[in-house]
Amino acid sequence: MKRLILTIFALIVFCGFSYSQEILKHAPEGFDTVRADIPHGKIDSVEYESKTVGATRKAIIYTPPGFSKDEKYPVLYLLHGIGGDEKEWLNGGRPQVILDNLYAEKKIEPMIVVMPNGRAMKDDRATGNIMAPDKVQAFAAFEKDLLNDLIPFIENKYPILKDREHRAIAGLSMGGGQSLNFGLGNLDTFAWVGGFSSAPNTKAPEELAPNPVETKKKLKLLWISCGANDGLITFSRRTHDYLKANDVPHIYYIEPGGHDFKVWKNGLYMFSQFLFKPVDASIFSEYSTNTTIQ
């Protein structure tokens, strides 16, 4: 009898886990539409002192519905593109709406989302020649600002789970390149990494994962997605090819679309559902280019 009960319990757990790993290929209609009948998270703007830059810098913070200072939360650092700033996701991607709707459907874990300005320089506005060498270099310099200034600030101000298993980084375009560079380059800090349409600032795969065995051991999830018609797809493809050749589990998802928020919003919708919960790597291949929607 005891063995029967244990068997039934195991089946329930397995079924529940399988359901949590439902394979989605695209967000449903209305996933980014505001719903009045559900609880909503809160958007705040914060300022932090950056010793790296020598200036006060800004970030946008999303706290989930039902946020309580008596609980501790994991964190997703969500990065923008070369022409944006800390408000780009908010203005173009509606992450707070996407996440609110996912919470209402019980599809994601409660998390704090930090949207910083990834251009680490005193004048970090997206004005003038956004491709100027000093502005491009500022995206690389953001790694130190993120690790040494922003993360400590966030973890002092908010009730945060401070281990690597509860810290994720993802971004679009230039921010996708930053996420792969910083995430894979700091696996003692991040266990969850996502690149949406990653730009040419993405390091060569041999630099991103020089020790594939170590990368495989430490990563909880590596997500790489891009639009099929995106002119920058080669940067995602070469990373995927290297990881596949070196047996590093990851999701490589190519969907219809170009270099735009339609693709990036869908990336956030799907990536966020994996975060901070058990992940079944055996389903990763189901996201291959042969199985995406047409």
Image: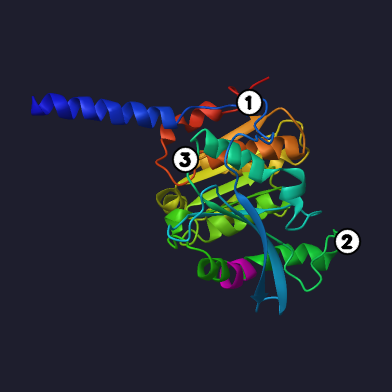
How dense is the environment of label 1, judged by Cα within 10 Å: few (below 14), some, or many (20 and up)?
few
Colour scheme employed for the rendering of this structure: rainbow
* 219 up-or-down from 282: above or below: below
Residue of label 2: 127
Say what secondary structure mark 1 lies in.
loop
Residue 12 position in % (x across, y down): 29, 27
Q: Is residue 188 left or right of residue 48?
A: left
Residue 127 position in % (x across, y down): 88, 61
Real-space Cα separation, disc 2 to disc 3, in angstroms = 39 Å
The three-letter amino acid code for the residue at tag 3 is Pro
Region rendered in magenta: 145-150
**Label total for image:** 3
Residue that sits furthest to the right in the current view = 128
Instruction: Check contact, mark 2 vs mark 1: CB within 8 A.
Output: no
For residue 28, which numbered disc appears in the image?
1
Real-space Cα separation, disc 3 to disc 1, in angstroms = 26 Å
The three-letter amino acid code for the residue at tag 2 is Thr
Residue that sits furthest to the left in the current view = 1
